[in-house]
Amino acid sequence: MTAFNSDKVFVLCFQEDAERLYKACKRYDLLNKFYQASNQWQKAIETAEAHDRVHLRTTYYNYAKHLEATGEQSLALTHYEKSDTHRFEVPRMLSEDLQALENYVNKMKDKSLWKWWAQYLESQSDMESALKYYALAQDYFSLVRVHCFQGNIQKAAEIANETGNWAASYHLARQYESQDEIKQAVHFYTRAQAFNNAIRLCKENNLDDQLMNLALLSSPEDMIEAACYYEEKGEQMDRAVMLYHKAGHFSKALELAFATQQFGALQLIAEDLDEKSDPALLARCSDFFIEHAQYEKAMELLLTAKKYEEALQLCLKQNLTITEEMAEKMTVSKDSKDLPEESRRELLEQIADCCMRQGNYHMATKKYTQAGNKLKAMRALLKSGDTEKIVFFAGVSRQREIYIMAANYLQSLDWRKDPAIMKNIISFYTKGRALDLLAGFYDACAQVEIDEYQNYEKAQGALTEAYKCLSKAKTRSPVEQESKLAHLQSKITLIKRFIHARRVYSEDPKEAVRQCELLLAEQDFDSAIRHGDVLGFLVEHYVRVEEFHMAYRYLEEMQKRIPPKNLSYYVTQQTTEAVHRGVGIPVSRTLVPEICHSSMDNTEVEEVADEVEDP
């Protein structure tokens, strides 16, 4: 007896040491197993819940098995539920007590248990009760199966239609097929997504209309099978073409469409062709569309097939408008291996030429630029009249000819009222080293100052700049250059004399008048100074000194040289009336109202001079 007690104490000490060591090294999984092995289930569950949750359900399950073995079914049932194994273990445990099992199933309201109980009842031939529990479990396939077994196929059909359950529909379709109710079988095969079976029945029973709809819903393989069926029958070939097309079998679809002359189908097929399609198919389609005068569609297919030359020739021949999208499709990138670089540039220039003929100047500019022909690009841009883009293009191109072209274009605008345009003209002629043309522009500026503003001081400055530019220019004809320089110098001299006469008038009127009269006698006088300005100056002077006969003489000279409507540019209405009163002659015509003149902004000619740069 003493020896037995000693062994028991030793075992207890060993267990305590094991428990302490498991806890110290935090091996709660081993500690859980230790508690289970030593029949300490409460500690095992507490350990699993607190530290070993990965084994919690296993612990519940093992404890439930232990309770079942000891006859404690109520507690075992609870722990089977906690371990989530009650759907199998509880029916097994209560299999000897059917009433208790039925009560448990009804209490749990679990679909899996309802289904299990329904299957059990069905095995016991209690079909009505089985149907009740299958309905609770929402097992529509089993409901349909049992109803079919009982011969209640109408009720089965209602369930299949209401629920749309695939398995139920398939089972019902098989039943209808066995009873030769083909249309119902096709319907339920379709509901079950079993299209191949539905297609099979349609082919066997000549249900061609339903066959088409089913094939379109099915796989490409089924589509091709249905298309072959239509083709073999030789009827409704449009359906065969459509199915081949939908299945991705483009070559067969096109072949059949060509053979049966189905133009509408060809158009639909052509829309799905891309660069991955067979080039021969693309070419054949384009030829077909050309034959039937559908040139734009043919053009798209040629571009898809990368037959750029043929597409462009078709465009030229049929006078098709090249849209931006078409032009971009015809543009081969530099990195492309479809065309060598020289051919690529030629193609781009041909596209641009076509755009030019169609008046699409911006697109032409773009394509000429991509082809590397900036001069043609500039010519196209000039035709567009887009001043902002012309100025920008000239600035980025940095080519002498383009600078000159841009400046020439800007001179055709109303540069007199826009200093920014004047600056660009000067800048472009300077950068283009076209000093002879710049000299001509300064000459034009001088003439504007005289004609519109009577500002001879600014005109003199502009002519001086023109003389500087022309003297530095390198022209083809030195003789002609010298002649132009002499002419400019003559104009500058005459204008200087007139400016001097007006300036000294306040101090020496007689000298000013003498200078003006001498100017009127100069041979090239009218090339530099307007008669009206000098004659008007003399008329004003003689009115001021009350020598009206002399004033009238110069006024008559003005009337001979200047149209009546322009007289008011040079003498005021009051001056004209004073002259007539002074000589006692009435005014014989209605005078034109005086027009006030103001000179151009004072900075403009100075800016003109400042912009000139040595080449």
Image: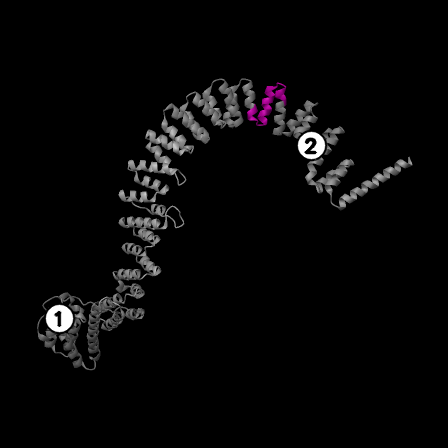
Q: Nearer the viewer, residue 387 or 283?
A: 283
- Tag 2 residue: 80
* Colouring: one colour
Q: Amino acid at mark 1?
A: Met
Point out the residue furthest to the left here.
Answer: 585
- Relative to 225, is 302 above or below? below
Q: Amino acid at mark 2?
A: Tyr
Residue 545 is a magenta residue: no
- For the N terminus, the image quarter is top right
Determine if residue 408 is in view.
yes
Whole-number angstrom distance, CA of label 1 to CA of label 2: 128 Å
Q: Position of residue 368 (x, y in %)?
A: 32, 53
- Label 2, secondary structure: give it: helix
Q: Residues within 10 Å of mark 2 (few under 14, many from 20)?
A: many
The quarter holding residue 403 reads bottom left
- For the C terminus, the image quarter is bottom left
Q: Position of residue 315 (x, y in %)?
A: 29, 44
Main secondary structure found in the magenta portion? helix
Q: Position of residue 111 (x, y in %)?
A: 61, 29
Q: Residues within 10 Å of mark 1 (few under 14, many from 20)?
A: many
- Relative to 404, is 238 above or below? above
Residue 131 is a magenta residue: yes
Specify whether 481 is left or right of 165: left
Give the magenta-colored segment's residue range: 120-142
